């Protein structure tokens, strides 16, 4: 086996391993985008603090069933369902024209690198913008 073949084999193996780790995270991010789109659809032109809090709670509830996150319990890392987001993690901004809104969620996903028993955190910044209902 020469050095070129070995290098190509390592590159293909590393690419497949990173794909195996990263693709489920991207699919979960699509669910986050869908939840944000549903939240934008619930907002009306008269965005009030009560409406905003309700939308934030609904999005956090929906994201509680998406994916998983790691928590430390009794000195061990335990995999727990949901993204571990609070309603306060969902930012709601009304557009300058008053007819649009933007929902944003910043979160990190920690993955366990299997043979190494190490953890790697990947950050996501997901935004959804849309027109408000009259």
Image (tube, rainbow, N blue to C red):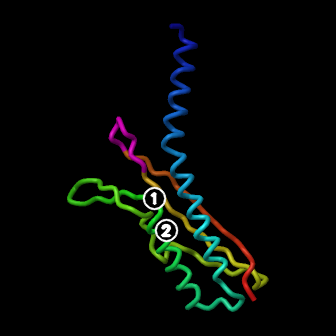
The x, y position of residue 72, in whole percent, is 28, 59
Residue drawn 42% across the image and 49% down it: 111
Residue drawn 53% across the image and 74% down it: 59
Q: Is residue 130 left or right of residue 68?
A: right
Q: Secondary structure at mark 1?
A: loop
Give the residue number, with chain letter if any, for mark 2.
Answer: 63
Q: Is residue 65 above or below residue 92?
A: above
Q: Is residue 98 left or right of residue 65?
A: right
The x, y position of residue 15, in whole percent, is 55, 33
Give the residue number, with chain letter if any, for mark 1.
Answer: 67
Query: Is the residue under label 1 in contact with that under label 2 (CB below 8 Å)?
Result: no
The x, y position of residue 99, in whole percent, is 76, 83
> Looking at the rendered structure, which numbered label has been put on residue 87?
none
Q: Secondary structure at mark 2?
A: helix
Q: Is residue 62 left or right of residue 74?
A: right
What's the magenta region?
111-118
Q: Is residue 77 above or below residue 11?
A: below
The x, y position of residue 95, in whole percent, is 73, 79
């Amino acid at each position: 086996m020469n050095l070129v073949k070995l290098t190509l084999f390592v590159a293909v193996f590393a690419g497949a391993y990173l794909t195996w780790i990263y693709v489920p995270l991207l699919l979960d991010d699509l669910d986050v985008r869908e939840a944000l789109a549903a939240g934008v659809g619930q907002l009306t032109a008269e965005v009030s603090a009560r409406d905003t809090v309700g939308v934030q709670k609904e999005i956090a509830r929906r994201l509680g069933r998406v994916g998983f996150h790691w928590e430390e319990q009794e000195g061990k890392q335990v995999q727990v369902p949901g993204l571990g987001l609070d309603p306060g993690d969902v930012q709601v901004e009304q557009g300058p024209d008053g007819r649009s809104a933007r929902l944003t969620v910043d979160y990190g996903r920690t993955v366990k690198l299997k043979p190494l028993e190490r953890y790697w955190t990947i950050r996501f910044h997901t935004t959804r913008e849309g027109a408000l209902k009259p």
